[in-house]
Amino acid sequence: MTVAAQPDTTQLQKRVLRTLFTTQILGGLAVGIGIAVGALLIEDMTGSSTYAGLGQSLFVGGSALVVVPAVRITERFGRRGGLAFGYACAVAGTLVIVGAIHLDNAALVVCGYFLLGSASFAGLQSRYAAADLAPEARRGSHLAIVVWATTIGSVVGPSVAGLAERWWSAWVGGPAYVGSMVAIGLLCVLTAAVIGVFLRPDPLLTARELSGETDAPRRSIADGYRTATTNRAVRTGVVAAALGHFVMVGVMAMTALHIRHGMADPEQALTVVGVILGLHIGGMYALAPVVGRLVDRHGARPVLVGGTAVLVAACAVAGSSPADGHVRLSIGLVLLGLGWSAMTVGSAALVTGAVTPARRPSTQGFSDLVMGLAAMGAGIASGPIVEYAGYGMLCVCCAVVALCVVPFLMGRIVPPKPAEGPA
């Protein structure tokens, strides 16, 4: 019997990782700029600090809901199509925002930021693209490399925002924040171009060819939901990702307000907020390769158990910190980032390993949809909880939410053997 020649997946996977590493830096810069200027732009447009955090919520909302069409595109055209679609939507968002700034229309800014969240979606989906051709024994590490690359853009992005504003003001002039939006748009265009040119052959389509699933039926988010209801490993991964994201967003969103309540000088408070949130971001991304190695060595479930414990500890440390207890608060926020990293990498590895390549886009898309909606819920709930019960009670509530994943982690999780042929 003649065996068809198989592509050298080792070399192809190295190319995939290099490409995704580059795009995560570029895309991370775009997202970092967007988050940095979002609250300021919306506050200036509306004249009310009540809506200052709306930009972050809209980012999350756009990231969640763009999953639905993106899954269909990924099913048809592979990872290149889905990722490029996400960044194209973000470019459209920057154009809407620039128009809204010139028209002084706050409602259009809201719509634009919703579209801009697509860049965040594409960044999250990139971790799955890194796992398509990864050896089973290295899947966690390869996922984590892409997650780690986000550190560069997330940390540098806010500084690039100020630089873009100064350059645009000097060369072109016009209203504030236009320079930041132009920078985001150019970065997203460049990211989409790198994906289109260098992410070839497509890792998902190649994985399907290797598994004999090229003729498998195309699936939607609804198929991902059905898979989660029948596959325990997928269900556990989806719940872990969603609850971890809920806790991280819920605590982080109100930390700046908690710090400001303990300081009389607004400028000094902003400096402290920047340092503490910077440490938090470092906790989220910097140790991702270590988390990935732990997933490869010990499996996803022990890492998820550890991540849950770290999230609870983070809530205890941060929630017991007074508003002026910056050292304790910093420790709590670093732990919060580490716990999120464990939940995100561990759940992604678990979900990816539990299904065949034909089912991955719909299942992974469903996981990210639930993850995004959970974050939206955290953003909506955290404000009223802090207003009426305080930051400490918010952390207590988030610790309880984190513990809700424990029943799903009990017992042995054994991903089913992939079926032969089209799934």
Image: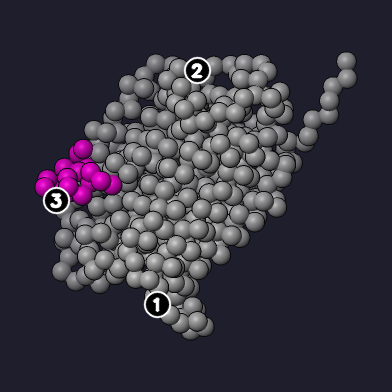
Mark identifier at residue 175: 1
What colouring does the structure picture have? one colour
Is tag 3's residue or tag 1's residue first in the polypeptide sequence? 1
Query: For residue 387: magenta?
Result: yes
Q: Nearer the viewer, mark 1 or mark 2?
A: 1
Secondary structure, mark 2, is loop
For this orientation, the residue located farthest to the right is 2
Q: Quadrant of residue 296?
A: top right
Return the x and y of residue 119 as percentages of the image width and height. 49, 52
- Magenta residues, start to end: 379-397
Residue 342 place in picture, x, y as percent:
43, 38
- Residue where numbered disc 3 is placed: 387
Q: Nearer the viewer, residue 358 or 152?
A: 358
Q: CA distance from mark 2 to mark 3?
A: 43 Å
Q: Position of residue 141 (x, y in %)?
A: 56, 38
**Relative side of 2 to 29, left or right:** right
As drawn, the label of residue 414 is 2
In the structure shown, which secondary structural element does the residue marked by tag 3 occupy? helix
Q: Main secondary structure of the magenta part?
A: helix
Q: Quadrant of residue 399?
A: top left
Residue drawn at 46 percent across, 82 percent down: 173
Gap between marks 1 and 2 measured at Cα: 56 Å
Mark 3 or mark 1, which is nearer to you?
Answer: 1
Asked whether the viewer can see residue 277, the reply is no
Q: Is residue 345 above or below residue 357?
A: below
